[in-house]
């Protein structure tokens, strides 16, 4: 029976490897520890330099969903946040002062909903910030954003399609995943949905993982493909030690997300890259409001204690520069400097 199970598993791996579409290789998960601790880990895997920097945005900022677009959604941020930016145009990861964590990942084959007359417009570049600014809990976000009252406008960046899906987690350990499948917004909402990778769509990820759960860790798929990383990460999250020691909790989350990361390596086919290397990793402690950051080409992990930043309405926007070779270690809240915030490009609606 063991040999038959092994043969079947190897066959599934081979089929998945042959059928998997080209994708980027981000991973994210939620770890629930003792003492009501909730900690998320994510990897950012991409083909080129994202010129990432960290930003501290206070509450009370007036924002537009799509620049000067007359049909843009407008809002004032209810919560302060610390975010990681990409290409100096968008937040792709971050946590707000209410303990809501938001992660943006690639999803090959995404088909967004067509804009609807009467809906306000929100550019894809502002999606993460919109969630961080407006919601304290996953349930709030699901109920409000799930009304489909906004047109999510999308455009290419550097010639690449922005096929994206989003995961959110709050301080209670609740999770939700937002995907656009065949032109419709699909939301998966449950405390049990603790792991997400790039592909296939989340519903199919759950089905694939169901088989491997029956194997109970006797052998795990080891490739860099998103579905294999989903299985490995799910297994390690579910088998991770539970402890009240916060330092050990953070170390546990880092150990799992590093296991799901992609090394710097030569592409087997330069014209069709399948997975991209991990550029950075974040670990967000939602209970203690501490945001950890690790660049894979730098020697140290550093972190931001949000309690030591002034994120109240009226405080200045601040930046921690990472794009000029800076190296940090330890807690860095005092090294943020006042700066003019980046502007997301406006997407043409014509």
Image (cartoon, helix red, strand yellow):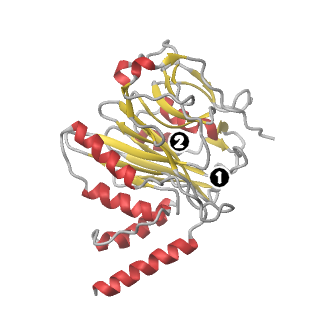
Q: Residue at x 55, y 44 (%)?
A: 147
Which residue is under mark 2? 145
* Quarter of the image that includes the N terminus: bottom left
Is the residue marked by circle 1 packed among few (<14), some (14-19), or many (20+) residues within 10 Å? some
Residue 99 appears in the figure: no
Q: Residue at x 39, y 67 (%)?
A: 209
Query: Residue 36's x, y, as percent?
Result: 23, 40
Which residue is under mark 1? 112
Query: Residue 259's x, y, as percent?
Result: 38, 55
Q: Within the image, what quadrant is residue 12 found in? A: bottom left
Q: Nearer the viewer, mark 1 or mark 2?
A: 1
34 up-or-down from 22: above or below: above
Marks 1 and 2 in Cβ contact (< 8 Å): no
Q: Check disc 2 and report its element: helix, strand or loop.
A: helix
Q: How many marks?
A: 2
341 up-or-down from 235: above or below: above
The residues bearing labels 1 and 2 have C-alpha atoms spaced at a distance of 15 Å
* Quarter of the image that includes the C terminus: top right
Residue closest to the eye, 224 or 31:
224
Query: Residue 27's x, y, as percent?
Result: 45, 52
Residue closest to the eye, 239 or 168:
239
């Amino acid at each position: 029976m063991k040999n038959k199970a092994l043969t079947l598993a190897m066959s599934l791996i081979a089929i998945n490897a042959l059928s998997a579409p080209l994708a980027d290789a981000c991973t994210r998960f939620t770890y629930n520890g003792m003492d009501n601790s909730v900690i998320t880990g994510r990897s950012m895997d991409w083909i080129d330099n994202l010129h990432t920097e960290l930003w501290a945005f206070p509450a009370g900022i007036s924002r537009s969903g799509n620049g000067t677009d007359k049909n843009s959604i407008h809002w004032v941020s209810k919560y302060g946040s610390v975010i990681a930016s990409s290409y100096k145009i968008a937040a792709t990861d971050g946590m707000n002062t209410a303990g809501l964590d938001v992660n943006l990942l690639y999803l090959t084959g995404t088909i967004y909903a067509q804009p609807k007359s009467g809906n306000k417009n929100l550019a894809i570049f502002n999606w993460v910030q919109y969630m961080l600014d407006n919601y304290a809990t996953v349930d709030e976000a699901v109920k409000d954003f799930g009304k489909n009252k906004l047109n999510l406008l999308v455009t290419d960046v550097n010639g690449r399609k922005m096929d994206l899906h989003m995961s959110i987690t709050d301080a209670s350990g609740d999770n939700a995943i937002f995907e656009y499948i065949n032109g419709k917004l699909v939301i998966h909402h449950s405390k049990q949905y603790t792991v997400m990778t790039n592909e296939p769509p989340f519903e199919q990820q759950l089905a694939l993982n169901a088989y491997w759960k029956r194997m109970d860790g006797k052998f795990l798929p080891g490739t860099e493909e998103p579905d294999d990383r989903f299985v490995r990460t799910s297994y390690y999250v579910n088998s991770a030690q539970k402890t009240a020691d916060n330092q050990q909790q953070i170390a546990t989350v880092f150990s799992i997300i590093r296991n799901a990361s992609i090394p710097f390596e030569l592409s087997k086919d330069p014209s069709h890259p399948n997975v991209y290397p991990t550029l950075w990793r974040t670990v967000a402690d939602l209970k203690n409001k501490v945001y950890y950051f690790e660049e894979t080409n730098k020697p140290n992990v550093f972190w931001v204690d949000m309690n030591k930043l002034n994120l109240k309405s009226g405080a200045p926007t601040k930046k921690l520069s990472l794009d000029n070779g800076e190296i940090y270690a330890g807690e860095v809240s005092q090294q943020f400097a006042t700066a003019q915030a980046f502007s997301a490009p406006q997407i043409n609606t014509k």
